[in-house]
Image (spheres, grey):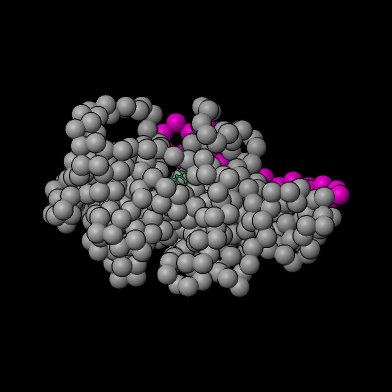
Amino acid sequence: MRTRQIVLASRPLGMPTADNLRFEEKVIEDLKDGEVLLKSWFISVDPYMRGRMNESKSYAKPYQVDEPFRGSIVARVVESKSKLFSADDLVVGDLPWMTYITTSAENLRKIDPVIAHPGYYLGILGMPGLTAFFGMKDIGKPRAGETVVVSGAAGAVGLVAGQIALLNGCKVTGITGSDEKCKMLKSEFGFNEVINYKTEKNIRKALRAVCTDGVDIYFDNVGGDITMGAIDNLNFHSRIIVCGQISQYNNTRFSMVPDILPRVLTRSILIKGFIVRNYGDRYDEGYAWLTEKVKSSELKYKQTIVKGFDKLPETFLGLFSGINQGKLMVEAE
Ligand code: NAP
């Protein structure tokens, strides 16, 4: 049997292009005991994949040149030589970008499409949802009446982070990159205020205008100038949750921005970076809470699904121009 796969063709310098990825076909081996044959259905594209295209060591292992990209995939079991799964089960796991995959049945999680659309297990009921849950609840610790700002607010993590703060009785401002996304945040997700950072040149002033009591929690998904604007509005004993820095991922040089530290000192600001994997031993708690809130419709979600395995490279690159509302993924078909 043959499968199609997408490999890293070369390492990018700065913004990646489709040429950094390559399609290939290969024969897949027969199943061994304990393995399953999967057909990919929904394939997640995530900002952290950009970091894995670099050679440098980070929290996630670099992709190797000529080896497949990998990440979270929802797949259907076609054939099973494992007691854990049967044909037709739907599973999610960290898997290579292939149309058909043979893999060990270990480390796959069965998913229930009755609870939610299968794509949700790549988003609100997957890694991005857990990220928002632990970042907001464990680091932000939102209290009723506080003012919360979320950057990257209309994305996979941001939508959940903002809604968790709303559920805790906070006033939430979302920052995102289009009027359409701003409208969605307010009308569909109940955000109190929104800022389009692409049309609003002075984020510091714009935040000051809408966050009249200052900012108690800043959930940072993007870094750069947006974050500098947020920091200027932070209150005493406020918290910065450093979740992502997507505006910096394609930079070839990094600044260490020590000039924020006097403000961190004089306003007793807590600034904490985190990786969702830090909470690996508490995933069940996160999944249970998110599943309950999705079932009860207290948390809503949005997905942008691009059809066709061939569209994976351009869809991944679309993360950096903001083509998505909510979780971005490809339906392999
Ligand atoms: P996402 O928000 O669904 O997609 C990325 C979004 O970032 C785009 O839609 C775009 O929206 C925005 N963006 C792109 N370039 C930008 C720029 N230069 N300045 C400002 N915004 C920009 O992605 P996600 O999966 O939810 O991830 C959000 C962030 O969290 C990323 O930084 C990611 O690396 C991080 N993350 C961290 C962890 C962790 O464990 N710490 C886990 C998951 C994700 P606009 O239209 O708003 O520009």
* Location of residue 255 by image quarter: top left
Rendered view: 123 above or below 88: above
Asked whether 20 falls inside the magenta stretch, the response is yes
Asked whether residue 58 is in view, the answer is yes
Q: Residue at x 20, y 42 (%)?
A: 236
x%, y% of residue 256? 32, 27
Rendered view: 18 above or below 182: above
Query: Magenta part of the protein: which range?
Result: 11-33
x%, y% of residue 286? 52, 55
Count of numbered marks? 0
* Location of residue 211 by image quarter: bottom left
* Location of residue 240 by image quarter: top left
- Would residue 222 be found to the left or right of residue 102 on screen? left
- Would residue 268 be found to the left or right of residue 127 on screen? left
Q: Residue at x 51, y 67 (%)?
A: 292
Asked whether 253 falls inside the magenta stretch, the response is no
Q: Nearer the viewer, residue 281 or 60?
A: 281
The quadrant in which the C terminus is found is bottom right
x%, y% of residue 78? 77, 61
Q: Residue at x 19, y 32 (%)?
A: 266
x%, y% of residue 108? 69, 53
Asked whether residue 225 is in view, the answer is no
Q: Nearer the viewer, residue 24 or 186?
A: 186
Q: Residue at x 28, y 59 (%)?
A: 144
Q: Nearer the viewer, residue 132 or 48?
A: 132
